[in-house]
Image: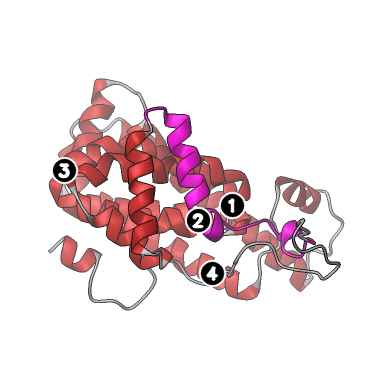
Amino acid sequence: MRPYVLNCPSPSVLSSFLPHLLKYMDEKLSKEWNDLIIKGVHISTLEEANAFEQSSLDINSNEFEEIFNEKVLRDLTRAYVDLLEPIFGSGTSKNDELKEYMLDYMPITEYLLKSLCHLMTCKDSVSCIRTTHLCARILPGLIKREVLREFIGKELLSSALQALHDGYHKESHPVIISLITDIYIDLRPISTIPFETFANLLNTDYEKLQKFEVDLSQATDLKIRKNIVKKFLERITGVSKGEWFKINITEEQKSTKRTIVGNYIKPKIGVLDVDDPTGLVDLFD
């Protein structure tokens, strides 16, 4: 499928099947990832994946079947990212034409953007990092299209915040913070939606949010801007499993009492997986 999509003589030819393919892949992966989270994730690191391949588990055991199915799901998720990445990379003019078509033809655009949100939040760090980089590359093109700005400021920004909140993605946090910074800085001058999303999701005091915006607007260096965003989002940034029960001792409160670092709540469903009549349905009517 990937060679056919990338080498299609005219992007309009894809309109007959690509919306159905993206819709099918998004719904299939979303359902299977939600089912996996309910059952419990077995593979959290590359080391665990390699250990499974070299393990001597009985292939007829339930444990082997569960871990094997999880690995297949991860491979399928990464294969889906493999399909999307070359289209939005720095390729030939033919790819540029295809990219523009996929961002302008709404039956494709809708499921492309939904897929990016879900891929960013699924519990696979490889897919999360690659998808976040992909989102950063196409962000200028998305913001340029006025009809997509509401989606970017709500759903895409919310998904990035959810991924940041998930301690599973600790290794991905730097690139996620970079994407959040880009969305806020690039979209805020022409829309209030990023401000509203921060205010609603972070339950932040209005004055603190205003001070954050002032600090962000006064910073000219990208590294400083990222540090401002990182510091502002510290209280919702997730920690890895190994740090959930670390002892946190301060000068003011030296104690041997075991505390949980941060305010981490393990999400069970994605931010888009709710029965809500608003959002994408209204956006793409």
Q: Quadrant of residue 190?
A: top left
Q: Which mark is residue 267?
A: 4
Question: Of label 3 and label 4, which has the lower sequence position?
Answer: 3
Question: Of label 4 and label 2, which has the lower sequence position?
Answer: 2
The secondary structure type at the circle numbered 3 is loop
Instruction: Kindly identify the residue that appears in the image at 73 percent across and 58 percent down.
Output: 243
Instruction: Kindly identify the residue that appears in the image at 22 percent across and 54 percent down.
Output: 192
Q: On the image, numbered disc 2 is attached to which residue? A: 163
Mark 4 in CB contact with mark 2 (< 8 angstroms): no
Give the class, few, some or many, for how many residues have Cα within 10 Å of label 2's Cα (few <14, many ≥20): many
What is the C-alpha distance between the residues marked 2 and 1?
7 Å
Main secondary-structure element of the magenta-colored stretch: helix
Q: Which mark is residue 151?
A: none
Instruction: Kindly identify the residue that appears in the image at 37 percent across and 75 percent down.
Output: 274
Mark 2 in CB contact with mark 1 (< 8 angstroms): yes
| Left or right side of 126 for 60 | right
Residue at the top extreme? 92
Mark 2 in CB contact with mark 3 (< 8 angstroms): no
Q: Which mark is residue 169?
A: 1
> Can you give x and y, in whole percent of width and height, for residue 160 in the image?
43, 53
Q: Which residues are magenta?
A: 220-247
| Left or right side of 203 for 239 | right
Q: Amino acid at mark 1?
A: His
Q: Which mark is residue 145?
A: 3
Instruction: Kindly identify the residue that appears in the image at 76 percent across and 60 percent down.
Output: 248
